[in-house]
Image (cartoon, helix red, strand yellow):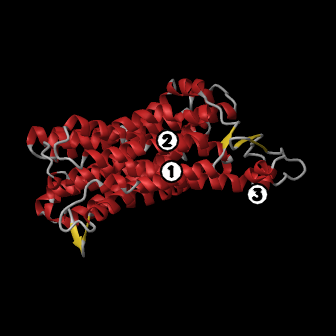
Amino acid sequence: MTAERTAELGTADADAARPGTLTLDHRPGRWIANWDAENKEQWEAAGRSIARRNLNWSIFAEFLGFVVWQLWSIVVVQLPSAGFKFSTNEIFWLISMPSLVGATLRIPYTFMVPRFGGRNWTIVSALLLLLPTIGLGLCVANPETPFGVMLFVAALAGFGGGNFASSMANITFFYPAREKGWALGLNAAGGNLGAAIAQLAVPIAITLLAAGTVNLPVAGFMWVPLILLAAFGAWKYMNNLTSAKGDVAGSLAALKEPHLWVMALLYIGTFGSFIGFAGVFPKLIKDYFPAFSSISVGAVALSLAFLGPLVGSLARPYGGRLADRMGGARMTVTAFAAMTVITLTMIWTLPLKNFWLFLFLFLLLFTASGFGNGATYRMIPVIFATSSRAARSGASTVATQRLASSALGLISAIGAYGGFVIPQVLNASNTASGSYTSAFYGFVGAYILMLVVCWFCYIRNATRNAMGHV
């Protein structure tokens, strides 16, 4: 064996498995064969450290994906001060286009890991983020940039939204079932935090040393070094698994399950609300309370919009933990009830024109959506294991796990369309009436509908069908 080959294996990765374990076979291109996360001896001997290293770099790459996905939500509120003259309708299209593209890309991205390898696709998907970041930096530098070009570059930011699906699919293959929930929760929460960090860092960066104006191209260029670091880290430290197999048949089978469509609707209400409101929150603050759109702190400007996605991201894993205790369906119903009450309170208190009350209520709304995210995501594998058509017909545990895995990817893609729907509904309400109030009442109606659907499908007959802890 060559010195280069020995170095590539690394001390931890090359440890021989203890007697009775399946020895990992490290191949060129950082491929690993014979991976079996359910084999406890292999897992303890070498698997855990390999999985943790891949998870760390996956979180970092996905974090940057969410950053890029949310860049335009921050940039659009700064366009007028940079000399751009776009209509409100055009602004909302710039906000919502990344979510439309990102949600659509989540479906093919799910199958990229089995096709190319998790490490290889992480490198590619990270480098693809250079297109929207550099493109943004170039097009916002010139106020004469046509709207069509701006919209195209905003669409490229959808690459960041697609990263979630491939990242979650990749980590699923690395972890055993007993630790999968925690690993996926960390991966998801780490990614979601990208939305908050982007909304915190960009306003500071574009005003730093800008002498009272904005240096808008920095909003894109500042992420280029980190993207290159993520691609390098994936190339240097991540692995591909030969055991990561695509499951197109499983996805087609999952599409025939009624529970997939029910859970997709619920996930639009939870995650769709999180990503949709994260995108429009800076715009809503500027429209309702322009004096608070940007708060001067020394020589830089700070937007408090970042607090929304921050609390929503932090609430997500706790939503999953509470769902383990009280049942995902009950937790989801509670989340929708809270979102209904909070949204109504926000509508009825808007005439007070109190920014701090508005901010507090929106932070509660983000928190409730975060709890709902964790709860609905926790429901999916349980439902497919106990109540799907396959489970009722006596399918094996392996078969129902395949269905659940495929369903998770498809539901995450469908739910992400909420990031497109919410800005467009707000835009339609503003165009029709000059106010966002009708849109918020529409969201209330949707939350009530989803609450009823969740109660009817998963709680109403809980005692009779043993689904009370779904």
| Residue 321: mark | none
Note whether 409 is above or below 39 in the view shown: above
* Residue lying at the far right of the rendered structure: 19
> Which amino acid does the dot numbered 3 rest on?
Ala
Q: Check the picture and name the quadrant holding the C terminus.
A: top right
x then y, percent, for residue 207: 25, 64
x then y, percent, for residue 284: 20, 53
Quarter occupied by residue 32? top right
x then y, percent, for residue 221: 36, 53
Q: Callout 2: helix, strand or loop? A: helix
For the point 81% across and 47% down, the residue is 2
The residue indicated by pointer 2 is: 125
> Which amino acid does the dot numbered 1 rest on?
Ala
| Residue 61: mark | 1
Q: Is residue 240 left or right of residue 76?
A: right
> Which amino acid does the dot numbered 2 rest on?
Ser
Q: Callout 3: helix, strand or loop? A: helix
For the point 12% across and 63% down, the residue is 352
C-alpha gap between disc 1 and disc 3: 23 Å
Disc 1 and disc 3 in contact, CB within 8 angstroms:
no
For the point 74% across and 45% down, the residue is 38
Q: Nearer the viewer, residue 433 or 62?
A: 62
The residue indicated by pointer 3 is: 12
Q: Is residue 262 left or right of residue 114?
A: left
